Amino acid sequence: MVRALAAPLGFAFGAIARARAAAFDRGFLRRVELDVPVVSIGNLSVGGTGKTPAALWLGRRMLESGWAPAIVTRGYGGNASGRILVAGRAGEPPADGRGGVEEVGDEAVLLAERFPGIVVCGADRVAAARHAVEVGGADLVVLDDGFQHRRLARVFDLVLVDGGTGLGNGATLPAGPLREPPSALRRADAIVVTKVEAIPPSLEREIARRAPGVPIFVASLEPRCMVAAEGSETVERPLAEIAGRTVVAVSGLARPDSFWELLDRLGARIVEVMEYPDHHLFTHGDWQRIGQAARGADLVVCTEKDLVKLRRFPFARGGLLAVRVDFALAAGAESSLLEHVALRTGPAPRLRGDGGRATPGSRRPAPEPGA
């Protein structure tokens, strides 16, 4: 019964998505322009494509280029209930206007942990972006998971595609994994195929057919180090620390297979796998079950996103580690992609020497999505 309904529901979902996109393209639905450039990072599919590492990477590169960027995110998994909050670092005490894991979710806290600028969270991305500019002093906004959030105008759309799963069966929810029809890729200003060293030729051909003329790049999620929580601090450890050791692997990811494969490549001997839903907020009972499993292992190893939630529980010193991964493009590809972004944002105000707001670069009109 469910399968029989999936195809017509997916067709209807796709038709609604196309109609909504056309309404924005033709001006029937209004877009809100800020007086600073907005660069969006998003995807077409549900599940992880590496948006959080990509947002961190882009925010850092914009900072290095002379901007004062903020990352704006919805705060998935949090209970901010319509409030605009600045994400606090893991282990920080609560403060007015700041949110921890329970309020803003794991990804926002992880970004705040690793990003030198501010991370602003809110279901209303327009209000959150305005807060970042007017209160936080940002002169550029990196909009996390913003491809479908078209109410906030942007100068650049960077779209990520998982190199392992691609566009799935090409169908929209619930018949497939897509939030919009594949033709929506035409709106992208650049596409990055993630989690692979090289783009599978069939996927490259499909993307080129769906989004002719849009530059395509490839990025991997590279393990950089292990990290451990020591009080309110996060301490880096060498990757080799898990090689040859027995490990209970814990993950709260939409698609954890790549995490298990990464641990295997790093030489960990996985004795038990514990999977939880994406953005899962670990409970005392979860901690007890993980601790029980860990009695037969050397270490508990999780993703860094899960560490921000598990660190509040008492683990044996050094017994809980997370893998830190970085969004990594080849040097030439990174320079090329950043040049594409810079053409739309213009130079940073501090590099122009005028001390004012940046004027967003021109943006080509997106072709109307087809079937």
Image: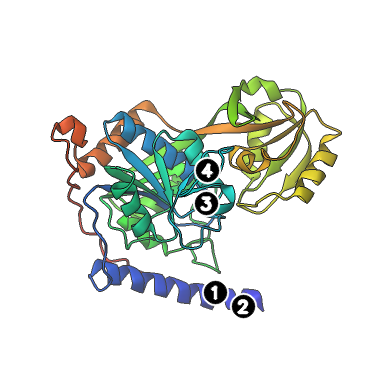
Compute the Cα span from label 2 to label 4: 40 Å
- Judging by the rendered image, the residue that carries numbered circle 3 is 104
Compute the Cα span from label 3 to label 2: 37 Å
Residue 366, placed above or below residue 138: below
Looking at the rendering, which quadrant does residue 209 occupy? Answer: bottom left
Callouts 4 and 3 close, C-beta under 8 Å: yes
Instruction: Please name the amino acid that badge 3 sits on.
Output: Val
Looking at the rendering, which quadrant does residue 201 occupy? Answer: top left
Q: Residues within 10 Å of mark 2 (few under 14, many from 20)?
A: few
* Tag shown at residue 7: 1
N-term-proximal mark, 3 vs 2? 2
- Judging by the rendered image, the residue that carries numbered circle 2 is 4
- Judging by the rendered image, the residue that carries numbered circle 4 is 109
Residue 237, placed above or below residue 158: above
SS of the residue at dot 1?
helix
Q: Mark 3, mark 2: which one is toward the viewer?
A: 3
Compute the Cα span from label 4 to label 3: 7 Å
In this rendered view, identify the residue nearer to me: 238 or 46.
238
N-term-proximal mark, 1 vs 4? 1
In the image: residue 105, left or right of residue 296:
left
Residue 59, placed above or below residue 210: above
Instruction: Please give the name of the residue rendered at 31% of the width and 57% of the height, measured from the top-left corner.
Output: 187
In this rendered view, identify the residue nearer to me: 83 or 26.
83
In this rendered view, identify the residue nearer to me: 296 or 162.
296
The answer to whether residue 126 is seen in the rendering is: yes
Instruction: Please give the name of the residue rendered at 41% of the width and 74% of the height, measured from the top-left corner.
Output: 15
Q: Residues within 10 Å of mark 3 (few under 14, many from 20)?
A: many
SS of the residue at dot 4?
helix
Check the image and name the residue furthest to the front: 96
Q: Residues within 10 Å of mark 1 (few under 14, many from 20)?
A: some
Report x, y in % for residue 68: 30, 37
